[in-house]
Image (cartoon, rainbow, N blue to C red):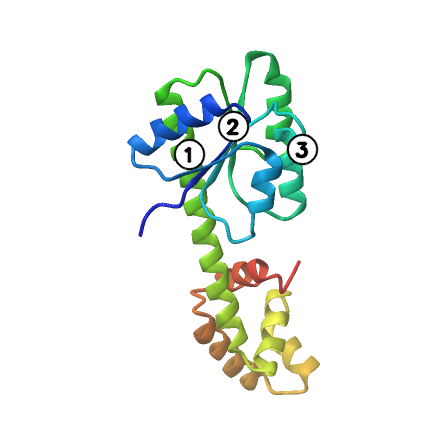
Amino acid sequence: MPAPPIYLVDDDSAVRDSLSVLLEVEGFRVRAFESAEAFLAAWTPALRGGLLLDVRMPGMDGLELLERLRALGAGLPVVVMTGHGDVPLAVRAMKAGALDFVEKPLAGGELLEAVRTLLAHDAERESRRREEGAVQERLAALTPREREVLEKLVAGQPNKVIAYELGISARTVEVHRGRVMEKTGARSLSHLVRMALQAGIVD
């Protein structure tokens, strides 16, 4: 399966062309956009890859785009590109969620390092997404009673208290607990708690 693309947003056509060629020669896929507005129009929550974003552009600048994407819940990793005088703006972009910034003109090695960082973060994000999906599927297989036992277990209640509150025997709680561990694939109670936190069952 090919690596996901790098999205390049820069209003300077010469910069877009030169960076696109450099990245494509190195085997990366590139989709270039001339403005923040054009990228935002093409964005969907399913986009994977990384965003290489110019900070200073006419209309919506890079910081505004980054803030808009974060407001939309976008998890796409971002590295911003900046001229020397735009470093304070780039720092603001990092505070808004960008991974890093690189100064123009970009050296080839610096650009490639930034792109590899983007794709590594995207791969990590996709791995977490898949893991969270798998956890949700396993939790969905629990019966209502098993779900109740799970919620009380992760709340720290001992079996006797769970049995009393649910009006069942401690032995029955043990049976439900065993089924919860089996169905979720949890290796220990602490693992089960982490899964429940990940799935939003407990705060």
Amino acid type shown at disc 3: Glu
Amino acid type shown at disc 1: Thr
Which SS class for mark 1?
helix
Taking 186 as reference, is 66 left or right? right
Instruction: Tell me the distance, in whole angstroms, between the alpha carbons under discs 3 and 2.
Output: 16 Å
Give the quarter of the image for residue 3: top left
Amino acid type shown at disc 2: Asp
**Which residue occupies 50% across, 83% down?**
175
**Which residue occupies 35% across, 31% down?**
23
Question: Residue lying furthest front in this view?
Answer: 13
Q: Is residue 98 above or below residue 158?
A: above
- Mark identifier at residue 64: 3
Q: Quick one: 124 or 142, which is closer to the camera?
A: 124
Which SS class for mark 3?
helix
Q: Dot 2: few (<14), some (14–19), or many (≥20) neighbours within 10 Å?
A: some
- The nearer-to-camera label among 3 and 2 is 3
Taking 139 as reference, is 116 left or right? left
Q: Which residue is mark 1?
A: 117
- Mark identifier at residue 100: 2
